[in-house]
Amino acid sequence: MLAGTALLALASPGAAAALGSASGPLLLVGGALIGVPHGSSDFVVAHRVMRPGLGAWWLPAFLAGYLALVALAMASWALMPLATLLGFLALSGLHFGWGDMRAGAATARPALAFAVRATTPVLPIFLVHPAGVAPFVAALGGVTEGGALHLLDALRWPLGLPWGVALALVTLPPLLGDARSRVAGRDAGELLAVALAAVVLPPLLGFGLYFCLVHAPRHMAELAADHHPTRPAAAARLVAAVVVPSALVCLALLYASWDGLAGLLDTETLVTWSLRVIAALTVPHMALEACAAWRTRAPGA
């Protein structure tokens, strides 16, 4: 679906314009159905990681730490907006890279593959769509829109060319037959689809589709496999128990506030504050995921 949407936009300028105008509503609905449930699964991960050591105190400790990190991130937006924006992008890239590499096939160039996985969902959006991204960079980073646009234009080739070469080195060998397994070919095709969506689709939609169709579903699948590796039915029930209530609550809130949000869908205000909240929630989410990964690798875990 990700590649199909990108090809549709590439083939039809009218479709591209329609997708651009629908980006706001699509992102809100996608976030309600997939994005928030993906984040709400942190409770399940925290129970598995923290309960063995803290017993009944795991939930208060989790909530206190989570809220403290969210407050720290929001304060950072107010005090150091540009540094916070850069840190948010770096953390997001690490998060995407780790998640996609864990689910992917073994590769002869793991460092290069990680770098490509970490940068592909976001970097080409900034380099290919500077005019569309500059207003949000200015609003989030506390810089002028003209300055942001000038910087993005200046970075297009110095960063875009190495990224394109690295993408080719990672994806072409599996697709041309030098693959260790079908999984390697599938991974290469998925990565190219993410790159195509980032380059062709409107900026917010390209990233939103990656997040809702690739990153979040993969996270939920790994969550289910970690808790019930040999019981598919129990794993499916766990995912449903996390996703359905969160999605229903978010959709209800979205429906109740739609009239108020409708006037903001095409403005930078809604997206700016949404990104700030997402960034604030990314910090504890990433910290918890790193803790869970470390505990999984630790001897005796």
Image (cartoon, rainbow, N blue to C red):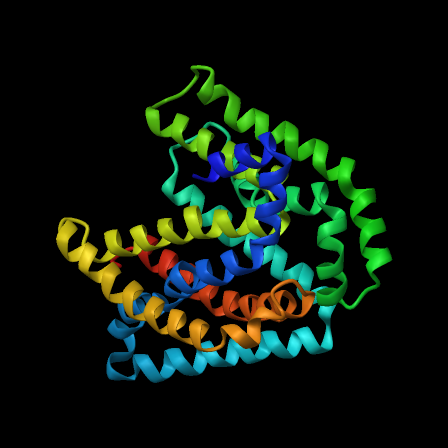
Residue lying furthest top:
177
Q: Is residue 217 left or right of residue 278?
A: left
Residue at the spot 63% in from the left edge and 49% down from the top edge: 203
Looking at the rendered image, the quarter that the N terminus falls into is: top left
**In this picture, residue 291 sits left or right of residue 129:** left
Q: Quadrant of the C terminus?
A: bottom left
Q: Position of residue 289 (x, y in %)?
A: 41, 60
Q: Please state if 82 lies on the left or on the right of 123 as rendered.
A: right
Image: 104 above or below 173 = below
Would you identify the image quadrant in which residue 47 lies?
bottom left
Q: How many marks?
A: 0
Q: Nearer the viewer, residue 276 or 67?
A: 276
Relative placement, left or right, of 184 versus 170 is left
Give the vertical position of 198 relative to 271 (above or below).
Answer: above
x and y, in percent, of residue 119 in the image = 59, 44
Q: Residue at x 72, y 39 (%)?
A: 159
| Picture quadrant where residue 37 is located | bottom left
Q: At which x and y percent is residue 199?
A: 63, 38
* Relative image position of residue 206 (x, y in whole percent): 56, 46
Seen at 61% across and 30% down, the residue is 166
Q: Nearer the viewer, residue 285 or 291?
A: 285
Query: Image point 24% across, 61% down: which residue?
Result: 240
State the residue in front, 120 or 95: 120
Q: Is residue 170 above or below residue 277?
A: above
